[in-house]
Amino acid sequence: RILRVDGNQLNVVNTVPFGLISDFSKSQNFVIQVDLLRILSDRVESDGKNFIFQATKVESISDTRGDERFNFSSEENVRCEFTNPEDEETILTKQILDMSASGFSLRTGAKSTLLMPGRKIAKVRILIGEKLYSESGAESVYQRKFMDENGKMHLQVGLKFLAAKIDV
């Protein structure tokens, strides 16, 4: 959360867990992204409580994905279910962050390697509440680390629907 903007400095709430602050401050690049605006910096300082983010560059991100995307909060209970491709037995359920006609993204653990780009899943069920919305195959196309508002690290994994959809 941005508390104040003063020229090219942004004061932001520190949500980095205490034990990770030292490693965080040693990073070489910092990014704040809000919708299609990306603010970059090569350093972040602290006022003792919050971070002072020195913006060095501001970029407008063009959304090259052609399909309209719909974002979901955890309260909306939009999720996917699929069989773990490693053991082909365990049913995994993941919250869907956003979805379009061509794919969706989900949140998973920061150290997960299960859905590396290129990983195909034979059948993914998309559920809204308790109702089945669709089923299809999917392929992981990207992974991106992010920190939530509580300072916990996650991976956002983007998956594209595979052409052959299964009627339900």
Image: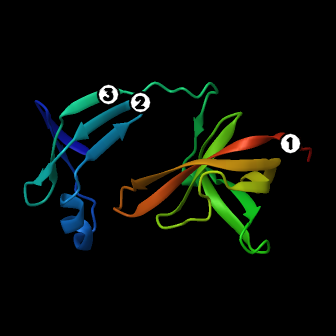
User: Label 2 neighbourhood size at 10 Å, few (<14), some (14-19), many (20+)?
Assistant: few
Evaluate whether residue 40 shows in this view.
yes
The amino acid type, in three-letter code, at marker 1 is Lys
The residue drawn where x is 68% and y is 64% is 93
Labels 1 and 3 touching (C-beta < 8 A): no
Q: Name above or below for residue 68 compared with residue 158.
A: above
Q: Residue 168: x and y, percent?
A: 91, 47
Labels 2 and 1 touching (C-beta < 8 A): no
The amino acid type, in three-letter code, at marker 3 is Glu
Give SS at disc 1: strand
User: Label 1 neighbourhood size at 10 Å, few (<14), some (14-19), many (20+)?
Assistant: some
Give SS at disc 3: strand
| Quarter where residue 85 is shown | bottom right
Question: Disc 3 and disc 2: Cα gap in Å?
Answer: 8 Å
The residue drawn where x is 7% and y is 55% is 47
Q: Residue 43: x and y, percent?
A: 15, 48
Labels 3 and 2 touching (C-beta < 8 A): no
Q: Residue 167: x and y, percent?
A: 92, 44
Q: Name above or below for residue 42 compared with residue 94.
A: above
Evaluate whether residue 133 shows in this view.
no
Q: Does residue 66 appear to the left or right of 20 in the view shown?
A: right
Q: Residue 58: x and y, percent?
A: 26, 29
Q: Nearer the viewer, residue 76 or 101?
A: 101
> Which circle marks residue 36 in the picture?
2
| Quarter where residue 160 is shown | top right
Residue hosting label 3:
59
Question: Disc 1 and disc 3: Cα gap in Å?
Answer: 37 Å
Residue hosting label 1:
165
Give SS at disc 2: loop
Question: Disc 2 and disc 1: Cα gap in Å?
Answer: 31 Å
> Which circle marks residue 141 in the picture?
none
